[in-house]
Image (spheres, rainbow, N blue to C red):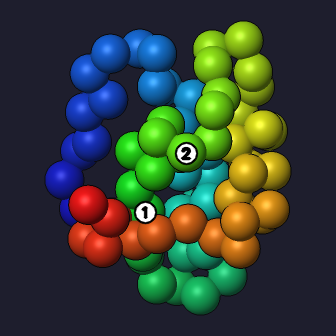
Amino acid sequence: MAVKDYGNMDSCWAFVAMATVESDHYIKTEHLVPLYEQQLVDCANITLNHISRRALEWIAENDGITMELDYS
């Protein structure tokens, strides 16, 4: 998998949240599924004042998150 570039630091929290979810999924299934951080940035209404936990809560409240290849 290629290194992801989050460019502007305002969305770094989304990369932390996605790395957490991807890692947890891999540990449980031994299958790496790249997820798309931009969905959190677009939909979760989270700012730098929030912590990554809110991103994980948003994922749980919305029954998961889209795979990177499927999000457009």
Between 69 and 31, the residue placed more toward the observer is 69
Residue 53 in view here: yes
In the rendered view, would you say 18 is above or below 48? below
At label 2, counting other C-alpha atoms closer than 10 Å, the crowd grade (few under 14, some 14-19, many 20 or more) is few
In the picture, measured across the screen, residue 35 lies left or right of residue 58, that is left
Which quarter of the rendered picture does the N terminus lie within?
bottom left
Towards the viewer: 32 or 8? 8
**How many numbered tags mark residues here?**
2
Residue lying at 78% horizontally and 38% vertically, measured from the top left: 54
Circle 2: residue type: Cys
Residue 19 visible in the snapshot: no
At 46% from the left and 40% from the top, the residue drawn is 42
User: Percent position (x, y) of residue 28?
Assistant: 67, 82
Indicate whether 50 appears above or below 3. Answer: above
* Residue that label 2 marks: 43
Task: Name which residue lies at 55% across and 75% down.
Answer: 26
Q: Position of residue 56 (x, y in %)?
A: 73, 50
Circle 1: element type:
loop
* Residue at which label 1 appears: 35
Q: CA distance from mark 1 to mark 2?
A: 14 Å
Point out which mark residue 44 bears: none
User: As shown in the figure, which amino acid type bears the numbered disc 1?
Assistant: Leu
The secondary element bearing badge 2 is classed as helix
Answer with mark 1 or mark 2, whichever residue precedes in sequence: 1
